[in-house]
Image: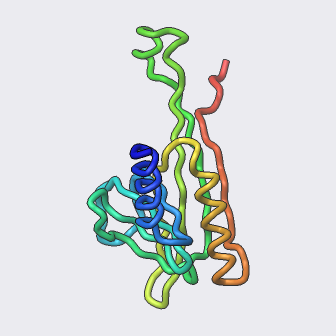
Amino acid sequence: MYRSSLLVLAVLVVAASRAPGQDTFKDVEYVSGHTGMEDKVKGVLVLDAKEIRFQGKDGAPLISIPLSEITEVGSQTDIRDASVGKKLLFGGLSGSRKQEFVQITYETAQTAEGLVFKVKQGTSTGLVAKLKFAVKQVQGKAPATDTTKSHPSPPSR
């Protein structure tokens, strides 16, 4: 009985710590696009009813974009073949490397920026869908979308 009470209490504490209507995407890395941020930074994307924020691992807000200013949302999947060294060492087990990115374009009265975030594999589609839905709720229309896949071209013979 004591263990089940602790479990219920733990679930309630976790649920209360997250704001209602807020989605959190962990294992995100800012890659480029924001004025004044030259280096890559790992952190978390937080989407709520009014804005999307990129926070550092320590929870400090680094970028905040009102949903009303977002003009385009897209995703890109890069598939890279294993290097020659890996292929020689591991043969068929070397595999390829897949990376997923999310791009967010927004405009304010003063500027326009296109931000690129590297996201955890398998999460870009869901993040883009949730962000488009949230923007549609605020603006009344969904933002433009650009989804691409890139990988090296086949070798010529």
Q: Is residue 137 visible?
A: yes
- Between residues 54 and 32, which one lies in front from this camera angle? 54
Look at the picture and state if 152 lies above or below 41: above
Q: Quadrant of the C terminus?
A: top right
On the picture, is 63 further left or further right than 133? left
Q: Residue at x 41, y 75 (%)?
A: 64
Q: Is residue 81 above or below residue 86?
A: below
Tell me residue 139's x, y (percent): 66, 83
Instruction: Classify residue 105 as left or right of residue 88.
Output: right
Q: Nearer the viewer, residue 84 or 89?
A: 89
Residue drawn at x 53%, y 76% is 106
Q: Nearer the viewer, residue 57 or 5?
A: 5
Residue at the outermost bottom position: 109
Residue 109 place in picture, x, y as percent:
48, 90
Q: Position of residue 152 (x, y in %)?
A: 58, 33
Residue at coordinates 42% horizontally, 56% vertically from top-left?
A: 9
> Which quarter of the picture shows residue 146?
bottom right
Residue depicted at x 64% and y 52%: 125
Task: Where is residue 37? Give x, y as percent.
Answer: 31, 65
Q: Is residue 116 visible?
A: no
